[in-house]
Structures are given as structure tokens and as C-alpha cells.
Image (tube, rainbow, N blue to C red):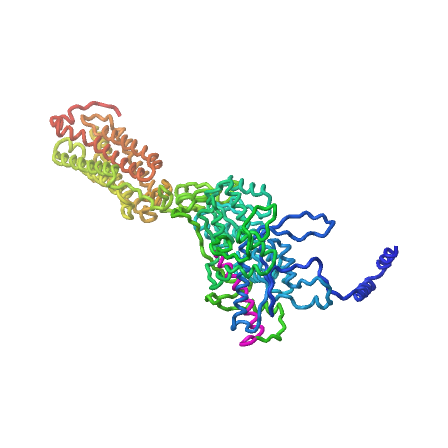
Amino acid sequence: MAEMDFLHRVDGLNLKDKLLLVASFSHAEDPKCRQSGDAENPQLVKEGDIMLGGLFSFHTNWKERPDSYMQKPQPLQCTSLNFREFQLAQALLFTIKEINNSSDLLPGISLGYKIYDTCGSIARSVRVALALVNGNENVASPSNACLRPAHVQAIMGETSSSPSTAIATSIGPFHIPLISHFSTCACLSDKSKYPSFLRTIPSDYYQSRALAHLVKHFGWTWVGAVRSNEDYGNNGMAIFTETAVQLGICLEYSVSFFRTDPSDKIQNIIDIIKASTSTVIVTFLSHMDLDILLHEFSNHNLTGYQWVGTEAWIFDSQTAAGDKNHILDGAIGLSIPKAHVSGLKEFMLDVKPLNSTNNNLFTEFWEALFSCKFTQSQSEEIQRKCTGHEDLTGVENSFTDMSLMPIFNNVYKGVYAVAHALHNILSCNKTCDSNVQLDPFMILQHIQKANFKTKEGEEVYFNKNGDPSAKYEIINWQPGENGQVPVSVCSEKCPPGTRKVLQKGKPVCCYDCVRCAEGEMSNNTDSITCVRCPLESWSNERRDACVTKEAEFLSYEEIMGILLTTASLFGTCLTAAVAFIFFRYRKTPLVRANNSELSFLLLFSLTLCFLCSLTFIGRPSEWSCMLRHTAFGITFVLCISCVLGKTIVVLMAFKATLPGSNVMKLFGPTQQRLSVLGFTLIQVIICILWLTISPPFPSKNFREFKDKIILECALGSAVGFWSVLGYIGLLAMLCFVFAFLARKLPDNFNEAKFITFSMLIFCAVWITFIPAYVSSPGKFSVAVEIFAILASSFGLLICIFVPKCYIMLLKPERNTKKNMMGKATSKSF
């Protein structure tokens, strides 16, 4: 009741009174600084002028004990002895002994050490680290003892990243240097969180990125990932994944594991790997976690995978020796460069001084090292009795294996970095100033600035993050000579000529290869897009290059061009033959009766019509484009004008036979010539205007065909072109009408009906020409135009002149004036 009354009275005080009350109670207490819990005793101790701490996991595991919260927790019971960590401790002892024996470094100053076993436990690592800083006293001491200097000036360790992060967080505010030989987590480079942490092994920031580039180098874009579920594995894999994504590498799965995980967790990992399609497994595993996984993988015969490893296990010969089922055959990865420390191997193999420690830990170590027992228990199998004088001659195990010499060298460099910092602080020359008060922050600053060379010539220094320079070697496990590189991709590479199309709902490494469309190409492997070819180019059959489009025009070399040229020359020769016949029989009644002057002019114009078709064949040029249409237009008008003149002459001749008619005087030879000249002159004017205003020109037609360029003559002015054709059509229609009117005039040889037939053919050809010309693509439109010219020319030649030649050559008895005029019939008009 009195206590409750006191508490009520305290609650009634104001803040100022409460503070005064607390202060009075503080002064009333015994001014002692007392350590909580049990004292932690180091496993190895050697006193010296300056003390260094060491943290090593001599055991890798511990027995789980359920807490009842009814009594004080029992001390951690460590299990699974780890010879590797004993080697690291030996490297520390060797380095300290070498420095103490040196007259050049810290002369007259001896270094001592306190080394603890952390058992692989983060909690224990922090506890023993604080024990190194505070000391082991469990007795009350004056209050000012809590402000005394740290018991050790620097701590060497830990091997793993997670314990190092916890320790660095705990001792960082006190600026106690923590120098790790194997903690590679990139997170430890953050000086805002871990200001007193340094290391002699490169950060995983570089290794993770280098591994991603290594995987990319071999073309492995579809991989799985297994990591330790702690800082080392999680941070290392995170950086690898980030870099891998940038390089186009996809992770099919990413699983984590810790050595204390239950067996069903391991089974789940095995099931995931078996169900995957990737054949490459990237690991960020500690060697302790890998050893457990390797045992389980062997039980499931999980072979045939390409393993990519880190420095945690890739250069460890003991890991390779333990791979009895060849799970890791062909493994490749990065390790820190090989190193050599003279004298270290001999020192490490001399284990007799360890047996003089009379420590339970080293009794356990000795019995495990030599497979003997100092004391036999009845429950155990009888083993050889230890004498304490055993040596390592002929012994082969992980302790005698020197494959971890690069890591031992890291311990060696770390201790020397502290020694050089102390050497500078104590202003050592031949002697050191022992009166200097050592300050952890001062030591930390000097270590960060350290720059020296080891006795082997290796340069040692730290960057602003407390990291050394990154150097790696590539190691490949090849048990035989067959080093075939496996393939691990979600989708095969898309060859040139295709592009990648992502598969819906899958990572970017899973895609289909789609062939580039016509007119597009890709000349790179795994192209994401196809590039459209330039206007004058087209994709080849493989779609991996753009080739110049084939230029298409009606040439003399192709069959169509040859046939049309032959027809043109044949028509020219035939016309010449007809002209020769007419010239030979020019004084006969048949020739004279049909206006020989117009006949020869018509034959001349037909010759030009046949020849002008040749200007349409061949590669279009500026002059040929202008010539072909204008020559065609003028020669055809000349031809039709002659036919029209002959038709008018027939009509006029009949009119002249009527009594009292004086028509022939109105359309005599002079008028006939002028009419032909006038009609032709109009077409010439039209052509001149066309050529002046907007003449035809050679052009490239890309519209008709995708893979061809049509070389053609653009009309320039469509009005000019259709004016030329329209004028020809107008004259042809006039000629047809006049010939039709004169078709039944009484005459033994009436030329009008032959002109009518020729005009029918002419008009039929050119009427069908228009739709055929418009609808024909490319060179076929030119062929249609040539065909129309030749067909209409042959129609005129055959219909008008062949019947006359037939009479002159085969029926000469009909080529008389009597026969021409003898059979007249009367007809009313």
C-alpha cells in the first residue's frame, strides 16, 4: 500500500519535479557500471600492448533449444565444426606473430588478440563483439569505467555478410574498426549505416554485375537463381537481377535457402528446378548452404545443369571434392585472384601449439582433425586414443587444403592495415611513442588512408567506401576435355529476317519469331523491329537485306519486245514492198484511178507509223518520252488525213460524173494537198503546245508493283495526251462517215468500201485500247499501245492496199480502164 501510495504521489508531480526526483534517485544509487548476463570468454587469447579482436565461426550451426521464459536461457550449444574457420584464425595468429617479430613495423610494440567462436549465429556474433569492446568483467566497477577505452582497437571478421552487418551496426557508433576478409555484401559499402566497416575483399556490387555479363556472354538468357536467405545472397542476387534485366536476361525462378531451413523447403526448391525449362542456375550461396543443398541434389540425381557460382564456393576444392555425383560438373564463376603468403602454410600446418591451450574447443578440433579421442565414453564407438603429439603428415582433409589461400591473404592484409595505421599514429621510427592515447576514430581514419605493399608486392588500400579494388578470375570446373557450352534460353534466337514478338503473360525472354513483312528487313539477330526498305529497294526472299528493286520496262531483249519489234519491222518492210509495187504499176489505171499521190503519201505515213512504235521500246529517256507520243500523234494524223483525202476524192469523183457537175475543180490536187497539210498542222500545233507547257518525261512508278520499279513515260499533261488521241479519233470518225456514205457508189472498183473496213478496224482497235491501256500494269500498258499502233497500221495497209496489189500482181486483166469503168450501175442519191 505504501508503494502504491508513493506511485500515486509521483503521478501527481509535474514534469520538473519528476526530473528532480529521478536525478535524486540516480545520485542515491551506488555509482557502479555492471555488465548484464554471463561473461563471454574468448577461445584464443594472447596479451599484448595493443589488443586486436577476432570473430570466426569455428562451428557453423547450433542446437535449437525452446525457451520456457521461466528460467535463464542456456548458453548456445554449437555444432558442426568448421576447419575453414580454424584456418582463418591461424592466418590471423601468423600475421600477428610476423608483425611482432618485425623490427620495421611497430618496433617495441606487441600485438595481442582475443578470438571468439560465433557459431554462425548473428546474435552471438553481436554479443561477443560487444564483449571484445567492453571486456569480460562481470563485477561491479566505478561508473567512469563505462567510459574507458575499448579493450581492442580493431576487430577482424566476420566471414559472412549478415553477422558483419549486425556487428557493424552495433559497434559503428563507437568507431571501432571492423575489417572483414570475406563479407562481400554490397550493402556494407553504405558508410551512413556502417561507418567503421572495412574489408579486404571486393564488394558484390562488382561481382554481381560481372556475373550477369558472364551469363550474357554465353548467350544464357533464360536462367534460374538460388540464393542464401541472408544479406549476402539477397543483396547479391538483387544486383545480379537488376543488371540481368538491363542485359536482356530473364529469371525463370529465384528461390532462397538457409542452412537451418526444414527439409520440405529443400524439396520445394528441387521440385521448382525439375519443373523448369532453363538449364543454367546462378547461385549466391555460402559454401555452408551449398554443402547442404548439394547433398540433397545428389539424392535426387539433379545433374545436367550449368551452375554459375560466386567466390563463396567456386574456388573451394573441398566443395568440388564433396561433389561425388558430379552435380557441379562444368560450373563456372568468379573468384578473387590467387595469392601466396610465404611461411603461412608451414605455420598453419603446425597445430601443436593449439593443443597447449587446454580449451574444450581445441580438444574437439584436435579429435576431429586426427580422428581420435582423448577420452572414450561407453556410449561411443571405440576410436584411436589421442596422444596430443599427432602431426599432419599424411593427413588430407579440409584443414590441410590450401585452396583458400586468397582468403587467408585477405586476413593477412587486414591485420597489416591495422598495424600500419598504428605505426603512423604512434609515430614509430626505431621506437614508438607509447604515450599516445589511442582513439578508435583516429585508428579508423588511418586505416582508411592506409596504402602499403605486402611482402609479396601486393598493393593494399581502401576506397571511400572502405572497399579494395575489384579483381576477379574466371574459374571453370571441367573434369574432362569435353567443354561443350550448354544452351539455356526460353526461346531460340530470332534469325535475321524476323522480329521478336513477346508471348503474352511471359517474361521478355520468351517470344515468338515473326517473319518480316514484304518490303521490310532485319539484319540483326533478335531484332525487335523490322525496318522498312527505302522506296527504291525491296526486301529479299530471306528478309535480311534490302535489295534494289528490279527496274521494269519493255526492252528489246525480252520476248515481248522482240515480237513487237519484229512486227514493227515486218510492217515497215511490207509497206515498203507495197510502195514498190505501186511505184512499178504507177501508170496503170488502178493506181491512177485511186489518186496515186495520196496513196504514196499514205504509204509513207504508214511506214512512219510502223517505225514510231519502236520509240516505245527500250529504257525511257527524256527524248524518247517526248518523241514517242508526238511522233505517234503526228504520223497517225498524217495517215488518217490521207485516208480522209482519198475518201473525199471518191465522193467528189462520183459527183463529177453527174451532168453539169463542177465538183472536182473544188477539190483538186492542190486542195487535197492543202487538206492533208492542214489536218496534220493542227496536230503539230497540239503537240508543240503539249511539249512546251508540260511535256512527257521519264518517271519511276512505285505504285503498280511492290518489288519492282516501273520505268515509264509520265504524260506530263494528260490534257495534251488525250487531245492528241481525241484529234486522231475525230479524223477517224470523219473518215469512217465519209467512207460509209461512199461505200455503194457505182464503180467497178470502189475504194470507199475498203476504207470503211479499214476505219472499222481502226476505230475498234482504239476504242478497245482505252480500257486496256488504263488497266494494264507497267510495261504491259506500253505493249498495249504498241499493239494498237501496229494493229491499226496493219488494218489500214491490208484493207486499202492489199486488194489493189492482188489485182496488179495476180489479176492484171482487171487492171484496165475499160474494166474500171465498164460495169457501172445507176443509183439514186
Measured from the top left, where is residue 612 in percent x and y? 24, 41
Q: Quadrant of the N terminus?
A: bottom right
The answer to whether 776 appears left or right of 269 in the picture is left
Measured from the top left, where is residue 657 in percent x and y? 20, 29
Q: Is residue 594 visible?
A: yes
The magenta stretch spans residue 720: no
Residue situated in front as seen by the camera: 708 or 759: 708
Residue situated in front as seen by the camera: 345 or 659: 345
The magenta stretch spans residue 410: yes
What number of labels is visible?
0
Measured from the top left, where is residue 648 in percent x and y? 24, 33
The answer to whether 671 appears left or right of 409 in the picture is left
Q: Quadrant of residue 731?
A: top left
Residue situated in front as seen by the camera: 193 or 402: 402
On screen, 20 above or below 537? below
Q: Quadrant of the C terminus?
A: top left
Q: Quadrant of residue 123?
A: bottom right
Q: Quadrant of residue 152?
A: bottom right
Q: Report the magenta residues as a range.
A: 402-431
Measured from the top left, where is residue 343 in percent x and y? 48, 64
Dominant secondary structure, magenta: helix
Residue shown at the point (53%, 76%) measured from the top left? 430
Q: Is residue 675 visible?
A: no
On screen, 336 above or below 625? below
